[in-house]
Image (cartoon, rainbow, N blue to C red):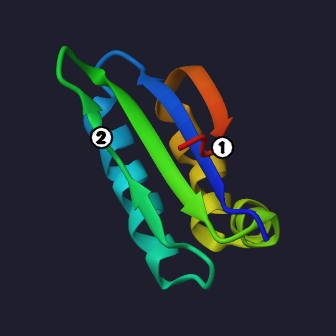
């Protein structure tokens, strides 16, 4: 089993940062109740209040895939919260080196 770590950087549409923040807070709160999720963080950019970074950790690829493809809150975000996103600046999956 290999832990999955990901980070996504999202930029909100002008005037939609509060709505996007609320959507992302909901997304990050739910996984803590899901099996296989040791952590989720939502930092914001100190210099740009429209930029958000989601950092996630999953026990393994199966737990991460189950979350991203079957959870109701992610489905809800894709159907509704995506309307507040101007662009996805980056999506990276990381591996631990040290």
Residue situated in front as seen by the camera: 22 or 3: 3
> In the rendering, at what x and y percent does residue 26 appear?
40, 62
Residue of label 1:
95
Q: Residue furthest left?
A: 46
> In the rendering, at what x and y percent does residue 27 appear?
47, 60
Q: Which mark is residue 43?
A: 2
Residue situated in front as seen by the camera: 47 or 38: 38
Q: Which of marks 1 and 2 precedes in the sequence? A: 2
Around disc 1, counting alpha carbons within 10 Å, would you say few (fewer than 14), some (14 to 19), or many (20 or more)? few
Residue at left offset 39%, top offset 69% = 29
Disc 2 is placed on an element classified as loop
Around disc 2, counting alpha carbons within 10 Å, would you say few (fewer than 14), some (14 to 19), or many (20 or more)? few
Residue situated in front as seen by the camera: 10 or 72: 10
Residue at left offset 37%, top offset 32% = 52
Which quadrant, please, contains the N terminus? bottom right
How many discs appear?
2
């Amino acid at each position: 089993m290999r832990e999955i770590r990901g980070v996504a950087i999202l930029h909100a549409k002008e005037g939609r940062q509060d709505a996007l923040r609320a959507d992302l807070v909901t997304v990050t709160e739910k996984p803590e109740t899901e099996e296989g999720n040791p952590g989720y963080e939502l930092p914001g950019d100190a210099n740009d209040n429209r930029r958000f970074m989601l950092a996630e950790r999953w026990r393994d690829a199966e737990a991460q895939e189950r979350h991203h493809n079957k959870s109701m809150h992610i489905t809800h975000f894709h159907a509704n919260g995506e309307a507040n996103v101007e662009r996805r600046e980056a999506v990276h999956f990381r591996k631990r080196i040290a």
